[in-house]
Image: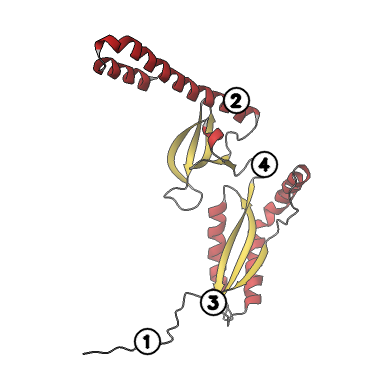
Amino acid sequence: MLAVAGFLITALIWLPRGNNLLTALGILGAGLAIASQEMVGSLVAGLNIWLGNIYRVGDRVRIGDVVGDVMDISLLRTTVMEVGEWVKADQYTGRVVTVANRQVWVNSVYNFTQHWGYLWDEITLPITYESDWQRASELMLEHGQTYTAELQADAEAKLNRMIDRYPLKDTKVEPTMYLAMTDNWIEMTLRFVVDAQERRKVKDQLHQDLLQHVQAEESITVASTTIEIVGFPTMQVD
């Protein structure tokens, strides 16, 4: 509204005197229509957020480009404690972001926590072809079980309720190993479930413990990028 008033004052100053009133009223009407449209859009969206249970206070969401934990939901705005941006993984930046509720009409809304509360995540370990990949797989599965054992029962129960309610494919919450052969190494990938708000913490612990155990295993060597030079072009020096 302040922007509309400022625009109106500027128009009154610069427009020819004879046309000031009618033109200003037209500009004011257009400005009020735009402002009311924005306000009504946010108001209706706010009601939809509440009644449609799109997200609640405490949920971790992504609305457009904004990711964070919902701190407050008013009729017109949603206030979020931001996550990510220049901070790696899912940790707070310290910035509080206010998002107009009407953004839910024009942007996809991702809810990380509301319906299930867990996410599937993965860590990858590249090992050389000379390594004992079966032992590496055992180690990764053991560590995955260690860090997810306490939450597996709850995660499975909640997932089963979702599967009963929605047409979702039945899937496992237990840690699972996947293997892929690349040009340079064997890629070992551990898939596991994790609390949606504890992802970075768990991955850090998994990586630390896994690195210690892999270094202690003589039969496993972590791979790094290698380049094989097969020949040089003929060079003539004058």
Q: Earlier in the sequence, mark 1 or mark 3?
A: 3
Q: Earlier in the sequence, mark 4 or mark 1?
A: 4
Label 4 Cα crowd, 10 Å radius (few <14 / some 14-19 / many 20+): few
Work out whether residue 196 or residue 165 is closer to the camera in this orientation and state it: 165
Work out whether residue 145 or residue 80 is closer to the camera in this orientation and state it: 80
Left or right? Give the position of 113 relative to 63. right
- Quote the CA–CA distance across marks 2 and 1: 69 Å
> Can you identify the residue that label 1 sits on?
232
> Can you identify the residue that label 2 sits on?
47
Comparing marks 2 and 4, which lies closer to the viewer?
2
Q: Look at 51% across and 49% down and name the residue there.
A: 90
Comparing marks 4 and 1, which lies closer to the viewer?
1
- Quote the CA–CA distance across marks 2 and 3: 54 Å
Q: Is residue 75 visible?
A: no
Disc 1 is placed on an element classified as loop
- Quote the CA–CA distance across marks 4 and 3: 40 Å
Left or right? Give the position of 172 relative to 147. right
Q: Is residue 140 visible?
A: yes
> Can you identify the residue that label 3 sits on?
183
Q: Considering the image in quadrants, where does the C terminus appear?
A: bottom left
Disc 2 is placed on an element classified as helix
- Quote the CA–CA distance across marks 1 and 3: 21 Å
> Can you identify the residue that label 4 sits on?
115
